[in-house]
Structures are given as structure tokens and as C-alpha cells.
Image (cartoon, rainbow, N blue to C red):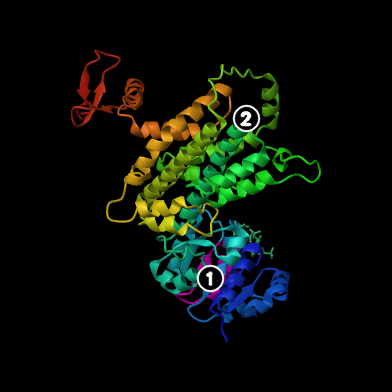
Amino acid sequence: KKAQIGVTGLAVMGANLARNLARHGYTVALHNRSVEKTDALLEAHGSEGEFIRTETLQELVDSLESPRRILIMVKAGAPVDAVIDQLAPLLDKDDIIIDGGNSHFPDTIRREHDLSQMGLHFVGIGVSGGEEGALNGPSIMPGGSEKSYESLGPLLEDIAAKAPDGKPCCAWISTDGAGHFVKMVHNGIEYADMQVIGEAYDLLRSVAGIEPADQAEIFKKWNTTELNSYLIEITSEVLSQVDAKTGKPLIDVIVDEAGQKGTGRWTVQAALDLGSPVTGIAESVFARALSSSNPAARQQAQKELPAGVLESSQLAEEEEFIEDVRKALFASKLVSYAQGLDQLVAAGKEYGWELKLDEIAGLWRAGCIIRAELLGEIMDAYQGDTQPVNMLLAPGFKKLMEDLLPSWRRVIVKATEMGIPVPVFASSLSYYDGLRRDRLPAALIQGQRDFFGAHTYARVDSEGMWHTEWSGNRLEIDAASSHT
Ligand code: NBP
């Protein structure tokens, strides 16, 4: 009997995806560079379904039905190219190579291009949900050709998480690197989601003096509101944990330096290239960097830099303050999602991807780290023919903002008075106000640019581009005529 799909790379993600496939009735051929991992998997879980053990890539290829489907789950970067280089010569036209790792989307675009020249399909898929998701149902974001999805789609949709309405959290995103791009932005949004929760925690603790155990209860309650999400749920778990060694809240013995593996940074780098203002994600990446990049500077600054805090305005009742923080968190979260989706739209234009934002929000509803009730509403906001030009302008969200804004502003004032950093709360509000304002100081920037570099400016009252002769008589000329 031939296998319907092969998996090469059987570390935690590959092994769990292979098991997930087998549990869904697929015959799965297994391969790993070092055969020990293959045997360990078979030994521990071989009875969960139909597996075919292979030792070499040639054996893997020979064990598969045609057209072949081979999922690569090795470390992102050079190992993926190494495996592709060994695998491609063994394959036939129309076979499909799938890369389910966290590959950087430009690599996926390059690989897809190269392999399509050889008559092979290459599908980069974003897989979110960690080990547990891989086993029990991840959120899956496939790129590659639409034709390859005809063969792969049913199988991926089978093993994907299911949203509350029963729909699989997997849909063809668009061509070449689109799947990995969307997964990358998902991770960027995840950074922002985590940072705004962190800011809320800090405010509750530093302004209202609420201890972690009590905050665990607050987050639990918040999880029954529109904030309902996986990350709020696990925040409550982390805050309730007591350190066995010291009897202190665990959070107080964890070093406050955040790590990162790089997908948040990629999101921001891509956003800079696209000119897409993802301030919430960027501030989240920088907040992690500030926490960990220069411990000596932090240490000295803690002792030496003046705080200059202001006489604090009177604190509202604790209940009111907690609700203000909840609303500020929610508003900032909405902005981060709006910005992430905006980046997807910009990327779609740049790379020629037709991204359906309702489907993308839909497949983030379950299985992945940012799964949240809100995503159902975002999905609804993008259904239908008229797409909002920005998520915040969808009717439901506009109305929500009206309710959230006073709390959001109050919380940021409080944090500023007391010297508590709230980079995402504050920058998200600035983004919101920036969108909303009728006149921005960008006009002044244009004036300055024209002054020092003759970069020209548009006028509010006439077409074309204009230049003032700053170093001469300061008369304005039509820029189109100035170079003749
Ligand atoms: P790792 O990223 O730790 O990679 C280990 C696997 O890569 C092993 O099977 C190893 O084979 C294989 N490998 C390496 Br390293 N170099 C190789 C080469 N030159 N040729 C062939 N095989 C090679 O595994 P993972 O944590 O399961 O993650 C797999 C992918 O999924 C990564 O891209 C990761 O970013 C992504 N991802 C991970 C998570 C997660 O929660 N861990 C979540 C979502 C996505 P060996 O056994 O012979 O050394």
C-alpha cells in the first residue's frame, strides 16, 4: 500500500502533524535525517494509524502515491533548502513539496519560483498553534498554486482546527509566499496582543496595587467579555501560579527580559518596506528589545535617571479603574488587528496576492495563538462586497470605539503621570488620533522637505506639485515647469 502523504523532519512539529494526519485516516510515510527520530515516533505512537517507515529520501519518494505530497518540517532556513535540493531530483512533474515550517516569505517566493521551473509544485504553509495545535488541530495558512490546493486542501482541512461554526481553520491564502506572509503577520499581531496584556497587568499592579493572584481572577472575568481569547486565558493561568521554591507569585521570580525568535521582527521589517504603519506590532517588538538588549543600561537607569513623575490626579474607584484598563486593552488590541490587516492589504498589492480578509480572520478563530472571539466579528466586518478601508471604520467597530475612548485616554494619562510605560496603549491611541485628525503636521514636514531638498508639495486647492523658491524670492512655482 502506498502512502497518501510523506513527512520529512520528525522533531516535535513534524511528528505531531504526522500523527494528526494518521489519526484522520491517512497513510503517512515517515522520514527523518537521523532515523532514530522515526523509530522513536513509531515506537511511541505507531499504533495511532497507518505509517510507513522509510530511511532515505528515495525510500520516502517510492512509498508515496502519485502525484506525491511531501511535507517538510525541518528547521527554517538553510535546512529547508538542503532538503529541497536532495528531494527535487527524485520527484516527477506535478509532485507537491510542502514547507510547513516558519520560513521567511521571500524564501518561499524564491523556492516556489525555482521549483515551478522544474514542473514541481511548492506550497509554503503557515502552521500556527505550537506542538499541541499540530497534534490536535492547528490553524493552517497555505500559499502556493491554487491547483496544488485542489490536491492538498481536503487533507489540510481535515487536520486543521475547527472554528466555533464548524468551519476548518484552513483556506488557500494566495500564491507563492502568501501563506507564510499571513502566518508572519499573525505572529506580529501575537506580539502586540501579548504586549497590551502586559501593559494592562503593569497598570493594575503599579497603579491599583492589585497582586497577581487577584489579577488572575480579573483576567478570568475578562475572558468572559469581548476580550475572550486564548492569550487572556493563559495570562490568568500564569498569574495564578505560585513559585514552589519561594512561595512568591511565579511572575515575580521570572527575569523581566523578553525573548523573541524573529517573526515579529520580520513583520515589522516587511511593514517598513511596504510603508505600512504597524505601530502596535513595532512597539511590541521594541518593548521586548528594550527589556533585554542592554541590561547594564537598564540597571544604571533604574538608579540614576530622574522619574519626574507628576502629582497624580485622583484615582477613580478601583472597579472603575479596572474597567478603564480593560477597555484600553481592548481598544489597543483592535488597533493592532486593524494595522495587521492593513499590512496584508498592502502586501497583497505589492506581491499580487488576492487576500480575502474575512477568510484570514476566519481561520485565526481556532487552533492558533491569537484565537479570540473578536476574530469572528472581524470576519463579519469583511464579509460582503464593500470592504471597510480600515477595520476601525467597519460600522460595528466605529461604535465600539465611542465606548472605549474615554477609558483609553484616562488610562494613558494616568500611566504618563506615574511614569509607567505603555508603548502600545499610547502609540495605538496616537495612530487612532492620527487617522482621525483633519489636519496632520505632515504639511509642515512637506514644507521642510521642500525647503531643504526641493522635494515639492501638493496644494489643498489645486492639482499638481509645487515648489517655493526658498533661497530666492520665495515665489511659488509649478514644479512641473521648474525642470524645463
Ligand atoms: P526544529 O526547528 O527543531 O528542527 C529539527 C528538525 O530539522 C529535525 O528533524 C532535524 O533532523 C531537521 N534538520 C535540521 Br535541524 N537540519 C537538517 C538538514 N540539513 N537536513 C535535514 N533535516 C534537518 O523542529 P520543530 O521545532 O519541530 O519545528 C519545525 C518547523 O516548524 C520550524 O520551521 C519551526 O519554526 C516551525 N514551527 C515550530 C513551532 C513550535 O512550536 N515548535 C510552531 C510553529 C512552527 P535531525 O533529527 O536529523 O537533526
User: Does residue 208 appear to the left or right of 391 in the view shown?
Assistant: right
Which numbered marker is on residue 403?
A: none
Q: Mark 1 sits on what residue?
A: 88
Residue 454 to residue 96: above or below: above
Secondary structure under badge 2? helix
Q: Are marks 2 and 1 in contact (CB under 8 Å)?
A: no
Closer-to-camera residue (462/212): 212
Is residue 99 in the magenta section? yes
Residue 25 visible within the image? yes
Query: Residue 449 appears in which quarter of the rendering?
Result: top left
Alpha-carbon span between mark 2 and mark 1: 57 Å
Residue 354 falls left or right of residue 75: left
Q: Position of residue 92 (x, y in %)?
A: 49, 77
Look at 44% across and 33% down and name the residue there.
429
Q: Which residues are magenta?
A: 81-100
> How many numbered dots are placed on residues in this image?
2
Residue 162 place in picture, x, y as percent: 49, 65
Rendered residue at 48%/78% (across/down): 67
**205 sits to left or right of 378:** right
Find residue 315 and report its horizontal and vertical position in percent.
Answer: 55, 25
Which residue is under mark 2? 206
Q: Amino acid at mark 2?
A: Ser
Magenta-span inclusion, residue 219:
no
Q: Name the residue type under label 1.
A: Ala
Give the crowd class for mark 1: few <14, some 14-19, many >=20 residues within 10 Å.
some
